[in-house]
Image (tube, grey):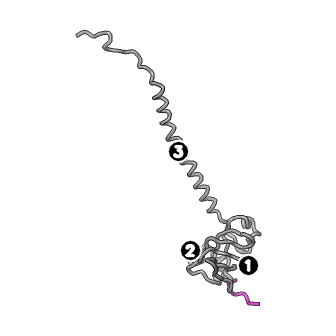
Amino acid sequence: MALEDDALNLSPREAVPAAQSVRSQKRRWKPALLLVVILVFGGVVVTKFLSSAIDYYCNVDEVGVRSGCEGTRRLRVQGAVDEGSLKKASGMTIFSMSFNKKTLDVQYDGDPGGVFQECIPVVAHGRMVNGVFLSDRIEVKHSNAYSTKNKDRIDKAEAAACSLPKL
């Protein structure tokens, strides 16, 4: 059987039509666009987390005085709940806390619960607004881990808590 001239075509193939090329380029952009969206979203989440995680730790006597303890930023303030200052009204817990003979009025939205009471050291998280510390979280000294890491702070707070003579 003899081969015809058309049986074996060794000429170059035709170029891919333009429509197919555009579709493949669009397919390549979709994963890249998705990756960019995920990275931007991740960056926003990390930034939000880090900005809320930075609460400066201050004693009552350092609020508005020490660098980092300005009343304009979110703070964690440590002090002892003053005896006779604890009041509850309209779902709020209102008390004053002291450290080194300085006092700070605190309003907490809710009931701190647990072992929260007068004359114990606490850490209140929140912001200063019009001279009152508006707290959204209260920590009460209750674990040996905290006591071990912050023994000097606790000793000072406990020594001052409710031990001052009444005038």
Q: Quadrant of residue 89?
A: bottom right
Residue ranking furthest to the front: 90
Residue type at numbered disc 1: Thr
Q: Quadrant of residue 119?
A: bottom right
Q: Which residue is mark 1?
A: 103
Horizontally, residue 42 falls left or right of residue 132, namely left
Which is more N-terminal, label 2 or label 1? 1
Examine the rendered structure and indicate whether residue 145 appears above or below residue 38. below
Residue 54 on the magenta segment: no
What residue lies at 56% left-to-right and 77% top-to-bottom?
144
Q: Nearer the viewer, residue 157 or 162?
A: 162
The span shown in magenta is 160-167
Judged by its main secondary structure, the magenta piece is loop
Which disc number belongs to residue 145?
Answer: 2
| Screen quadrant of the N terminus | top left
Q: Secondary structure at mark 2?
A: helix
